[in-house]
Image (tube, rainbow, N blue to C red):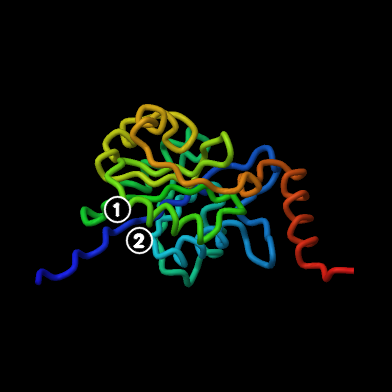
């Protein structure tokens, strides 16, 4: 009887390099439930079994490096952090070894992405030949996104915003979709966004009356 096939190695790339202009301060360092957003995202990627996990940093890189200290991950620094998202993704992809067969791309400010969602993407990829697996929240597709190595070349050639949006669009008919609750589609761009998210978690922690 032949030995079982080893599972594909799936990496994680977390995009956390931006200047957070609309927030007015580095949103990756904001704390939710006692944990910074960047560390929160990294912890979830690690808990989902992604390996390696690469966090792309840029704005206030030294502070983010200190915030992630002690976690078993790799850092990619993007000095031109005001440039498009594609530059961050390229830096993350370029750190991945040849043994990585797929990558999950995450945004550091999507605070309601769960370990369960990440694990669902990986499980879906292992059960299909689709070149990518896309999270779908109702009628909206958004990160996290899983790309197989066959698409890495297209991702590295792509320039622009939106986590490889053009590549996702080009392969939308071949993609597999993982359905997630619409309430999980939350990112944090402004002080008002963060206040709303913080209030949600505070309310969830309050005992019933």
| Residue drawn at 39 percent across, 47 percent down | 146
Q: Quadrant of the N terminus?
A: bottom left
Q: Give 206 or 66, whichever is nearer the viewer.
A: 206
Q: In the orientation shown, which residue stands out farthest toward the right?
A: 209
In the displayed structure image, the side of residue 173 where residue 106 appears, left or right:
right
Q: In the orientation shown, which residue stands out farthest toward the left?
A: 1
The disc at residue 96 is 1
Quarter assignment of residue 193:
top right
Q: Position of residue 45 (x, y in %)?
A: 46, 60
| Mark 1 residue element | loop
Disc 2 versus disc 1: distance between alpha carbons? Answer: 8 Å
In this rendering, the answer to whether 83 lies above or below 74 is above
Q: Which residue is mark 2?
A: 52
Q: Is residue 66 visible?
A: yes
Q: Quadrant of the C terminus?
A: bottom right
Q: Give 165 or 207, whichever is nearer the viewer.
A: 207
Quarter assignment of residue 24:
top right
| Mark 2 residue element | loop
In this rendering, the answer to whether 154 lies above or below 74 is above
Q: Position of residue 94 (x, y in %)?
A: 30, 47
| Residue drawn at 51 percent across, 46 percent down | 179
Q: In the orientation shown, which residue stands out farthest toward the front?
A: 1
| Residue drawn at 30 percent across, 45 percent down | 148
Q: Residues within 10 Å of mark 2 (few under 14, many from 20)?
A: many
Query: Is the Cβ of the residue at disc 2 closer than 8 Å to that at disc 1?
Result: yes
Which numbered disc, 2 or 1, marks the residue that appears first in the sequence?
Answer: 2
Q: Position of residue 191 (x, y in %)?
A: 75, 45
């Amino acid at each position: 009887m032949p030995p079982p096939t080893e599972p594909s190695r799936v990496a994680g790339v977390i995009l956390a390099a931006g200047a957070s202009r609309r927030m007015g301060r580095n949103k990756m360092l904001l704390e939710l439930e006692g944990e910074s957003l960047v560390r929160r995202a990294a912890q979830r990627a690690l808990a989902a079994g992604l390996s390696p996990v690469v966090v792309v940093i840029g704005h206030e890189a030294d502070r983010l490096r200190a915030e992630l200290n002690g976690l078993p991950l790799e850092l990619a620094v993007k000095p031109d952090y005001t440039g498009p998202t594609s530059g961050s993704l390229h830096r993350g992809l370029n750190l991945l070894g040849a043994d990585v067969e797929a990558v999950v791309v995450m945004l550091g400010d999507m605070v309601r992405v769960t370990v369960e969602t990440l694990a669902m993407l990986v499980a879906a990829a292992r059960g299909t030949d689709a070149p990518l697996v896309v999270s779908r929240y109702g009628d909206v597709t958004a990160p996290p996104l899983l790309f197989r190595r066959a698409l890495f070349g297209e991702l590295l050639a792509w320039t622009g915003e939106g986590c490889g949006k053009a590549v996702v669009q080009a392969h939308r008919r071949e993609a597999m979709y993982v359905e997630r609750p619409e309430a999980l589609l939350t990112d944090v761009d402004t002080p008002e966004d963060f206040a709303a998210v913080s209030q949600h978690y505070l309310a969830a922690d309050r005992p019933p009356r």
